[in-house]
Image: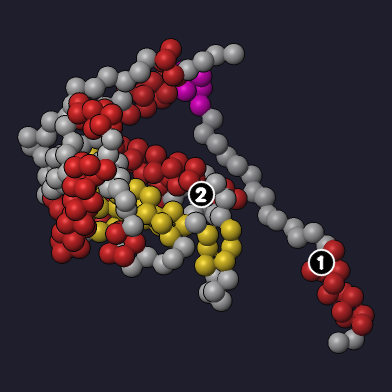
Amino acid sequence: MDPSVAASLFTIFVVMPKEYLFISHEPLRLSEEETRTRAHDFLRLMDRRRSVRQFSDAPVPLEVIENIVRTASTAPSGAHKQPWTFCVVSDADLKRRIREAAEQEEQASYNGRMPKDWIEDLAPLGTDWRKPFLETAPYLIIVFKRAYELKPDGSKRKNYYVEESVGIACGFLIAAIHQAGLVSLTHTPSPMNFLSALLERPENERPFLLVPIGYPAAECRVPDLTRKELSDVMVRY
Ligand code: IYR
């Protein structure tokens, strides 16, 4: 290569900082009154959310699930890497296999793997190893965290704050489900690696959370729980 061409290329690709595009941001600009009302209304909405373990098999349109996943994927993430994959399962045979594998793990957990204190802490929730909702709910979303990205050439690219990012995305997911009038459960069968095998996920993905989604069963009951007061969760400085 001509040395002057090489010099120009060096300047363009090595010396000159790349210009990144910034666009203007147009946030909602609300009056203080409207902000107060909306904060209050959102609290009232979210405070009605409950984790549900008894699902109806009533169908949910796929479009609703897609928009819920799109909402989850708006979450902030480390270096905007969006290190998540949402596996959406509605196939009855796959749901059955997930249930069978989850129940096998849960049976071992409830019958010896979980310490006594843990079992006692769960008693008010009325949970046990049986997970019929994994078949009844019309959809299961299995959230995978991407420990790193696998490039097409096989090389790896780091992700950042993966746990935090995927946790926030799951929060958005659960809020979006509730906002749409559906119910969900944050289910964490343990260990969860059977999900990687059943869903044939690549090596850079690790199961993070299993979220059944649907309508509650007509006879659905939830434990009589209260939430902490503001004074127990907020400290002012
Ligand atoms: N994974 C078990 C046990 C369980 C653990 C916690 I922490 C809960 O809040 C609820 C259940 C199960 O799903 O039953």
Question: What residue appears at the point 17 percent right and 56 percent down from the top-left corner?
Answer: 100
61 or 161, nearer to the observer: 161
How many numbered marks are there? 2
Helix, strand or loop status at disc 1: helix
Residue 70's label in the rendered image is none
- The quarter of the rendered structure image containing the N terminus is bottom right
Magenta-drawn segment: 30-35
Whether residue 60 can be seen here: no
- Report how far apart the C-alphas of labels 2 and 1 lie in the structure: 30 Å
Q: Is mark 2 within 8 Å of ligand 1?
A: no
Q: Which residue is mark 1?
A: 14
Residue tagged 2: 162
Residue nearest the viewer, comparing 31 with 112: 112
Task: Let me know if residue 34 is in the magenta part.
Answer: yes
Residue 101 lies, with reference to residue 165, above or below; the image says below
Residue 195, given in percent of the width and then of the height, sits at 30, 59
Judge by depth and name the residue closer to the eye, 89 or 199. Answer: 199
Q: Upstream in the sequence, badge 2 or badge 1?
A: 1
Query: Residue placed at 55% from the left, 36% from the top?
Result: 27
Q: Amino acid at mark 2?
A: Val
Residue 87: image quadrant is bottom left
* CB contact under 8 Å: marks 2 and 1: no
The reply to whether residue 159 is visible in this rendering is yes
Residue at figure coordinates x 52%, y 67% from the top left: 150
What residue is drawn where x is 31% and y is 25%? 47
Residue 196 percent location from the top left of the image: 34, 61
